[in-house]
């Protein structure tokens, strides 16, 4: 949409397309498509690989980060959506870079306010954006017998214009930069007032927390349910044995 041509790979499948960050050159901006962190073991890039890829991107951005464009498909606000927001916006960019929300799949006129209508839902989950956009991101492949194709093309053009305007309105004039410190090669914000060692430990702590949330927390409820079931079975078995014992006494 932003490039005016089909170039970025897109997928609705269980496996993410972007294994590394990709740079797309626009006449005014450089856009970087980053590795995604999806739900499920077969969903997207392996988490640690994606973190390494992201680190390489941050190291390569000499002029810094001017704007975050957070893209999601229309639907419920999942735990993954919330975690990715916290990782990119809060932990990596320290809430120093403006972020706009772009919700795709809003192809019809009645859906053009979907993101704004769900603003409170995002805020309830700790996610705040400079602007909430609902867009039609695909104008090709529609069945003329099922939809009004001309209205889809109109929605696409409208979405494109709104997105351009939002980028121009919220982009930082001077990018927010990262710098690399320490032998471990961990990237932290150059604007962080912490000392190098403190910043290093703080960054590692944040990554460990996020690793726990992504890799461990989703299974915590299941583990608890299995444990509770096992305890119930044990107690039921004890009751049965007591009953049998009383019959033979």
Image: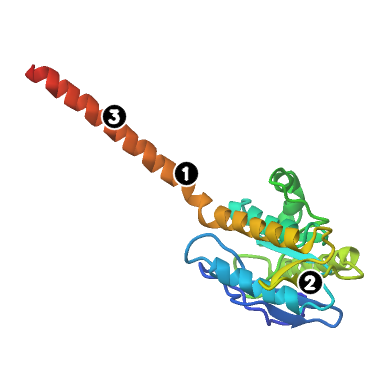
Q: Residues within 10 Å of mark 1 (few under 14, many from 20)?
A: few
Comes first in the chain, label 1 or label 2: 2
Closest to the observer, 246 or 20? 246
Closer to viewer: mark 2 or mark 3: 2
Q: Nearer the viewer, mark 1 or mark 3?
A: 3
Does the residue at mark 1 contact the one at mark 2 (Cβ under 8 Å)?
Answer: no
Task: Say which label, 2 or 3, has the lower sequence index.
Answer: 2
SS assignment at label 3: helix
Q: What element carries label 1?
A: helix
Label number found at residue 221: 1
The disc at residue 235 is: 3
| Residue that carries the numbered disc 2 in the rendered image | 179
- Check disc 3: other Cα within 10 Å, few if <14, some if 14-19, many if 20+: few
Left or right of 223 on screen, residue 246:
left
Q: Nearer the viewer, mark 1 or mark 2?
A: 2
Separation of marks 2 and 3 at Cα, in angstroms? 58 Å
Q: Where is residue 153 in the image (x, y as percent from the top left)?
A: 74, 71
Please state, as top left, top right, bottom left or bottom right, where the N terminus lies in the image: bottom right
- The structure residue drawn at horizontal position 77% and vertical position 62%, both measured from the top left corner, is 93
Q: Quadrant of the rendered structure where residue 182 is?
A: bottom right
Quick check: 79 above or below 49?
above
Q: Is residue 197 above or below residue 247?
A: below
Query: From this viewpoint, is residue 39 visible?
Result: yes
Residue 102 can be seen, yes or no: no
Task: Please provide percent x and percent y for residue 101.
Answer: 75, 59
Q: Position of residue 151 (x, y in %)?
A: 73, 66
User: Which of 134 and 236 lies nearest the eye of the viewer?
Assistant: 236
Percent of width and height locating residue 154 = 77, 68
Q: What element carries label 2?
A: strand
Give the number of the disc on residue 17.
Answer: none
């Amino acid at each position: 949409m932003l490039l005016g041509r089909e170039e970025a790979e897109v997928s609705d499948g269980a496996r993410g397309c972007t294994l590394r960050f990709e740079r797309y050159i626009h006449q005014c901006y450089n856009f970087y498509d980053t590795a995604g962190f999806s739900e499920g073991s077969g969903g997207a890039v392996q988490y640690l690989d994606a973190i390494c890829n992201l680190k390489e991107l941050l190291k390569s951005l000499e002029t810094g980060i001017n704007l975050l464009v957070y893209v999601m498909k229309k639907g419920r606000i999942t735990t993954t959506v919330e975690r990715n927001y916290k990782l990119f916006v809060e932990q990596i960019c320290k809430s120093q870079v403006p972020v706009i929300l772009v919700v795709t799949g809003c192809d019809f006129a009645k859906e053009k306010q979907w993101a704004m209508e769900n603003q409170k839902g995002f805020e309830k989950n700790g996610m705040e954006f400079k602007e909430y956009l609902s867009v039609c991101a695909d104008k090709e492949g529609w069945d003329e017998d099922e939809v009004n194709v001309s209205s889809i093309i109109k929605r696409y053009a409208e979405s494109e214009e709104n997105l351009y305007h939002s980028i121009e309105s919220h982009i930082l004039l001077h990018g927010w930069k990262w710098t690399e410190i320490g032998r471990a090669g961990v990237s932290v914000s150059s604007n962080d007032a912490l000392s190098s060692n403190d910043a290093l430990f703080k960054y590692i702590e944040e990554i460990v927390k996020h690793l726990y949330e992504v890799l461990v927390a989703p299974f915590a409820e299941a583990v608890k349910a299995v444990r509770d079931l096992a305890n119930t079975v044990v107690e039921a078995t004890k009751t049965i044995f007591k009953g049998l014992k009383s019959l033979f006494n």
